[in-house]
Amino acid sequence: MEQVYIETQDLSVGYHGKALLKDIALKVKKGEILVLIGPNGAGKSTILKNIIREMQPISGGIYIKGKNVKDFTSKQYAKTMSVVLTEKIKTEMMTCRDVVAMGRYPYTNYFGKLTKEDEQIVTESLEKVSAMDIAEKDFSQISDGQRQRIMLARAVCQKPEIIVLDEPTSFLDIRHKIELLDILLEMAVKDKVTVIVSLHEIELAAKIADYVMCVGGNGTIEFGRPEQIFTDSRISTLYGLQQGTYNCLYGSTELKKPEGTPRIFVAGGAGTGIFTYRELQRMGLAFTAGILYENDCDYPVAQALAAQVITEKMFEPVGEEAFTAACRAIDEADIVIDTGCPTGQMNERVKELPEYAKAHKKQVLFRPDSETLRNCLLQ
Amino acid sequence: MQIKKIIRCQVVYILLVVLFVLAVIFNINTGNVHISPARIFCIIFLHGDMGTPEYNIIWKIRLPRLCMAAILGGALSLSGFLLQTFFRNPIAGPFVLGISSGAKMFVAITMIFLLKYMSGMPLWAQVAAAFVGSLLAMLYVLLFANRVKSMSMLLVVGIMISYICSAITDLCITFANDSDIANLTHWAMGSFSGSSWSTVKLAAAVVFPTAVVTFLFSKPISAYLLGEGYAQSMGIRIRFFRVCIILLSSLLSACVTALAGPISFVGIAVPHITRLSLKTTKPVVTIPAIFLCGAVFCMFCDLIARTIFSPSELAIGTVTAVFGAPVVIWLMVKRQK
């Protein structure tokens, strides 16, 4: 059994003596990653501020290796924990290397002189975030992504046992997001650094978290393993999603489902339908989707966007029931869109759907590009 | 890269020392009464011609005044530097934030009251009054600084405080005796004239220890440059640190205001000139340079103040404003980009 590294007991946090969040319970071991998710303003930052001792808990305590954090001296704590904050720092005439070197603060002598060893650690930290190429550049003149990396290098340079990051991936493009999280993951696994990070990107949270803490807008807190926490309904409630949907398995979001009675039938499957579904959503047209297997990758999107989805159980041949349902839907529709789903022994009958439509004088579009689709539908 | 930086710093320091020496020489050498360099040398180092008017001019007027300009110039610059660090605002300074005016107001009030009961006001009492006044003004600025985040708003608040303090000072002067007024108005203009060895001693006793303490704070100041949150995470006790910075800067600017009156723009201009020439913000390097540069700046300004329209003398603030204000305008414009 590995020992718990950081935990809280009956922790309540808030402002001006009033508790905003109560009964915060977390337990994380060394080298594990805890991700805080939740809507804006729910209190993720407040929890983090208590952990980094910028604020005092209203009640209860935070313990690192069994010791209450308020019993650490400033210097001890600085050697234990380092941070990456949301506050943007303004520097003048400081190179990136200078900023990173500030991380050695708790270790240097009275005047902050860097020893050879310190310099070595600074270089290593810069290498770790692959920022050697910008080391000598002025910190105020680099991009947001580079800046965040430098701030991470600064935190690494402090040689902490635990690192706390407040929304480090905001304002970063997808490449920099992934790179940043990769570095965190590597630190956790290789160097056994405990990581506590708040993220806005739930799909990324699911990928790096060992533990997840949901901080809800109404003061609810849930803590657990990602597989326990990441359910579609929980995420929807957590963020108060009313119009769109979030799919936890794929980490994908879809916008609001179009309203109205479906006048279009989309015969999709195997990923061929997704773009058409979304195109129809953008035009605000309700549609029926079918016939999809429940494990088809089109299925979650169809489920989110289609007025009705006609499905068949997975690994079964398309049966009479599904087929008739599809025919009913085609009867109701004016236009049938065939997105060209590949067929095999099991779903042979799907091929019959366009023919059925033609026989019933419905307009059939075969794999239309978005322009033809728009021309046909907006007439 | 590193070596280049070190060489740059060395060059700047050497330059500052050379300028300092030049300032000293010029200041001793120029004045209403012409004294030849040879005699000056003789008077200073050999204590020759004791009792002659020239001896008195050198020893009782020029030298103390020179020391005063150097010490107080350094103090003002350091005070400005500390305030800029504290407020993270490049144009903060004891004068623009109204701290000098607060000190002035308090000195004026105490002077008027004390003179009713005593024949004169002891120097240390002036410094103490100025210190209290600075702290009071500072507290007001802090009160508003928490609410206004923008740099220009802070400036406006400072200027308003400065106006209020000046108004109260003027009010006091209106109700004061004639003899006090002569004393006050002269002092309120700001000047290094009237410096004597006793004022120099007092200034040195306050400024040098404060400057040394400031220098000892250079490591936390360097961390503070990254912002409060980061500074705290690196192990700085933020509250203690902030109180110290406030006290140090108030003490420095109070000392200047009490002994030489309010002097504008040195506190803003000098730290920037120094940083720009050193091309670094490392406090270990910049703090001594800022002090030195402030000393040189004030000595030259004083030289101009007393020689340009000689025999009449300009207020020191007039000269420093001419050189300092453009720096502030330039900083504002640069920030806007």
Image (cartoon, coloured by chain):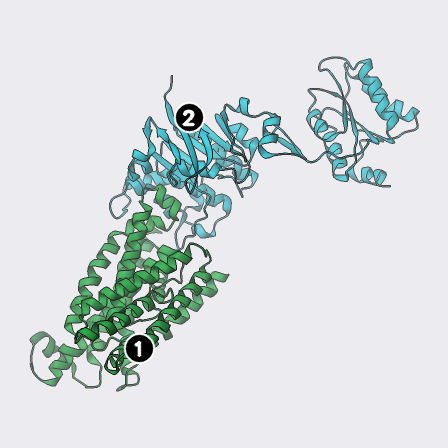
Chain colours: A cyan, B green
- Image spot of residue A36 (x, y percent): 49, 32
- Image spot of residue B232 (x, y percent): 35, 44
Examine the image and state in which quarter residue B183 appears: bottom left
Q: Circle 2 sits in a helix, a strand or a loop, which is it? A: strand
Res. A28 mark: 2
Q: Looking at the picture, does residue A170 appear above or below residue B272?
A: above
Structural crowding at the residue carrying mark 1, measured as other residues with C-alpha within 10 Å and reported as few (<14), some (14–19) or many (≥20): some
- Amino acid type for the residue under numbered disc 2: Val
Q: Looking at the picture, does residue A91 appear above or below residue B108?
A: above
- Chain of the residue that carries numbered disc 2 in the rendered image: A
- Amino acid type for the residue under numbered disc 1: Ile
- Image spot of residue B9 (x, y percent): 30, 58
- Chain of the residue that carries numbered disc 1 in the rendered image: B
- Name the residue nearer the viewer: A67 or A144: A67
Q: Which residue is drawn at 54% across and 28% down?
A: A206
Looking at the figure, which quarter contains the C terminus of chain A?
Answer: top right
- Image spot of residue A232 (x, y percent): 62, 26
- Name the residue nearer the viewer: A332 or A55: A55
Q: Mark 1 points at which residue?
A: B173
Examine the image and state in which quarter residue B286 appears: bottom left
Q: Circle 1 sits in a helix, a strand or a loop, which is it? A: helix
